Image: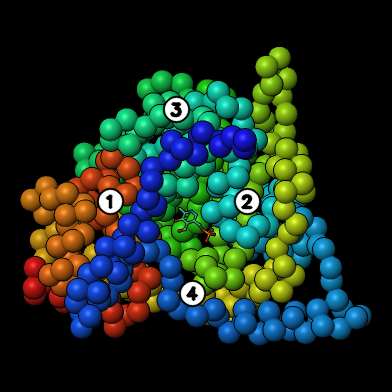
Amino acid sequence: MAQVNEDYLKLPGSYLFSEIARRVNQFKEENPMADIIRLGIGDVTRPLPTAVVEAMKKAVDEMGQAETFRGYGPEQGYEFLSQTIIDNDFTPRGVKLSPDEVFISDGAKSDTANFQELFGVNNTIAVTDPVYPVYVDTNVMAGRTGFPNELGQFEKLVYLPCTEENGMKPILPQTHVDMIYLCFPNNPSGVTLSKEELKQWVDYARENQSIILFDAAYESFIREENVPHSIFEIEGAREVAVEFRSFSKTAGFTGTRCGYTVVPKEVKVYDAKGEDHSLNSLWLRRQTTKFNGVSYPVQVAAAAVYTEEGQKQVKETIDYYMENARIIREGLEQAGYKVFGGINAPYIWMKTPDNMGSWEFFDKLMKEVNIVGTPGAGFGANGEGYFRLTAFGTRENTVRAIERIKTKM
Ligand code: PLP
């Protein structure tokens, strides 16, 4: 008899977006004429930049010719891409990296999900609350969390509440933790940390020999000065941090799939005897065993993001989404709602009116003005009473949605 991995049974039953889909489908069946606008799931609507498409087409042609065909590539990615990433995303910010510290992957979801495998099951983990659910669920699957309580919080995780009082910015753990997941610009709250604020986390990690798993999937949406794009802009971070990046939101790669993870050679983990081991070597070992690399045309396409044309087109797309963000944020403020985010991030985190529950507000918004967003409670206990809207819709739908909220709610 095959035994189940019982850790999987500790996971909450229904994934947030399936529950949303279920409610929307039911509403549509009952109201087939409703003109529903979706500002919920974080998928993008703008197409790939033409520079990216052209580069990918050429690479596909190369794959069709015996002289230029390529089979298996390096599991950790081609150096033409890792070096281009370093030259464009890091060197101009004063961050020195070598290509073997950059691991190309099929996106930040897999990397943020898989990276925990390198750590022992007895590590204590801190996550913000609310949080991108992948960090929590993958640690549940790995047996690091124990069981959830009635609020859905797992007994062995350390939750760092992000609330109105602290401006959605977590405060340092009061007890020792070994691993800390941070995501800035944040999904779902849209807030960022300043360099000084992020430095406190790096200092904590250095003092406690902890590791920060830093998700920078939304760094390209940063508009303001003094907001770090990379944790490696902070002194000392090379010893204690790993950074996850993605082309998904930056360049429309949600369906094309490419991202990368930076693992500096200085980051160490320890065995029971106290001997240190390089996280970079362990991740290389893991990737070369379990992953066979991103396809060549997709890596060529990702490299094209950094060409002059590519950069111009990506900037236009990001400006487009950030104008949506402004429309949502300012529109909600004018309508009297308390909002966070939307300045350096494509997410707007709004407080529900009259302390209404997140799911109750979801139903109200869907039924009264036919707008679908994401209930904050789906991101953690402290997300209750909040609601997330995204700037990834079309301009037309964004404007219409905000008009409806302003005039009909
Ligand atoms: N990290 C965060 C915080 C996200 O919000 C998302 C996607 O929504 C991802 C990672 C996943 O990105 P990718 O498409 O690169 O897998």
Q: Which of the two labelled residues, at mark 2 and mark 1, occupies the earlier sequence position?
A: 2
Callout 2 amino acid: Thr
**Distance CA(mark 2)–CA(mark 1):** 28 Å
Residue drawn at point x = 37 percent, y = 64 percent: 41
For numbered disc 1, what is the local secondary structure? helix
Which residue lies most toward the right here? Answer: 67
Residue 330: x, y in percent? 20, 67
First reached walking from the N terminus: tag 4 or tag 1: 4
The numbered dot on residue 146 is 3
Disc 2 residue lies near ligand 1 with CB under 8 A: no
Residue that carries the numbered disc 2 in the rendered image: 261
Name the kind of residue labelled 4 in the image. Lys
Whole-number angstrom distance, CA of label 3 to CA of label 4: 44 Å
Residue 81 vertical position relative to residue 110 in the rendered view, above or below: below
State the separation of the CA atoms marked 3 and 2: 28 Å
Q: Does dot 4 land on a helix, a strand or a loop? A: helix
Confirm if mark 1 falls within 8 A of ligand 1. Answer: no
Tell me if the residue at label 3 has its CB under 8 Å from ligand 1. no
The amino acid sitting under disc 1 is Gly
Distance between the Cα atoms at labels 4 and 1? 29 Å
Instruction: Work out whether residue 72 can be spotted.
Output: yes
Crowding at mark 2 (Cα within 10 Å: few <14, some 14-19, many 20+):
many
| Residue designated by label 1 | 376
Where residue 87 is drawn, which disc sits there? none
Q: Nearer the viewer, mark 4 or mark 1?
A: 1
| Distance (Cα) linking label 1 and label 3 | 23 Å
Q: Nearer the viewer, residue 385 or 319?
A: 385
Badge 2 element: strand
Q: Is residue 335 left or right of residue 280?
A: left
